[in-house]
Amino acid sequence: QSALTQPASVSGSPGQSITISCTGTSSDIGGYDYVSWYQQHPGKAPKLMIYEVTNRPSGVSDRFSGSKSGNTASLTISGLQAEDEADYYCSSYTSKNILVFGGGTKLTVL
Amino acid sequence: QVQLVESGGGVVQPGGSLTLSCAASGFIFSSYGMHWVRQSPGRGLDGVTFIGHDGGNKFYGDSVKGRFTISRDNSKNTLYLQMNSLRSDDTAVYYCAKLGSAWDVDFWGQGTLVTVSS
């Protein structure tokens, strides 16, 4: 059982927008602005897409955006493209000083 | 460019030991905290352990506490994970991961597979 809760799967058609939620508690997501999101293609290492709730690393498309409200963080992907099909994981800081992740969401581009 | 290259994975019997290494390059290794993260086959990501930039602070997940030890040699730009009393549920790909600016991981290694099986 993962510390953070994500939907197992989401889907959308090319050009559409989708949002993936990540729910935690006041001890993690709700207590700190250290939420990050990772994209993982099959057989590959994860890639950082969003850090500190809303920030994009250099080179990440501005179609990816992050937000947070209370104990829930969200990743929105606009203008869906076939290459966006992957697994997405959220992560948050906790006082345990160990990375905690959501269970992952499989994005299917129809 | 940043590179993290793990080695040391393999097949080990239950109760056995294994040491993983991660060779870092392309950044000032001694300035950054480092994580080990694992991923069991077909499963999600699991934070295993973290070490501060100078090795002074170490933290462990509950499932590995007392069995795994993280360490680093800043003179060799290398991160280690000593794994003892291995169990079948430790079977996973183990990733070496560099701490970013805000408790994120901005670079990941390619991973090394550890299989615990008799």
Image: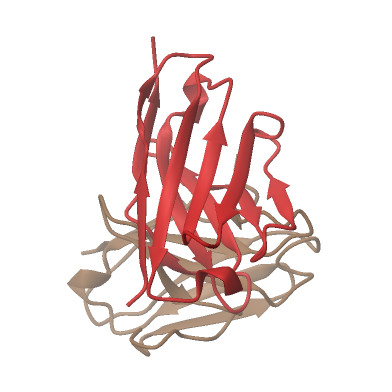
The residue positioned 56% from the left and 60% from the top of the image is: B34
Q: Is residue A110 left or right of residue B70?
A: left
Q: Position of residue A19 (x, y in %)?
A: 46, 72
Q: Is residue A62 above or below residue A109?
A: below
Q: Residue at x 42, y 52 (%)?
A: B22
Residue A9 shown left or right of residue B28 in the figure: left
Which chain is brown in the rendering? A
Name the residue located 65 percent from the left edge and 49 percent from the top edge.
A3
Q: Is residue B90 visible?
A: yes
Extreme-front residue of the structure: B75
Left or right: where A105 falls relative to B73: left
Q: Answer above or below: position of A95 versus A68.
A: above
Name the quadrant containing residue B99.
Answer: bottom right
Residue at 62% over, 48% down? B49
The N terminus of chain B, quarter of image: bottom left
Front position in the image: A46 or B28: B28
Residue sticking out furthest to the top: B118
In the displayed structure, B115 sits above or below A4; it is above
Residue B44 placement, left or right of B9: right
Q: How is the image coloured?
A: by chain
Q: How many marks?
A: 0
Instruction: Please state the horizontal and vertical placement of residue A37, each as a whole percent of the image.
Output: 49, 69
Residue in front for this viewpoint, A58 or A80: A58
- Image quadrant in which the C terminus of chain B is located: top left
Q: Nearer the viewer, residue B75 or B107?
A: B75
Residue B29 or residue A28, whichever sits in front = B29
Q: Is residue A4 visible?
A: no
Relative vertical location of residue A17 with respect to residue A41 in this rendering, above or below: below
Image location of residue B54, percent across then percent down:
67, 64
Chain whose colour in the figure is red = B
- In percent of width and height, residue A24 lies at 69, 59
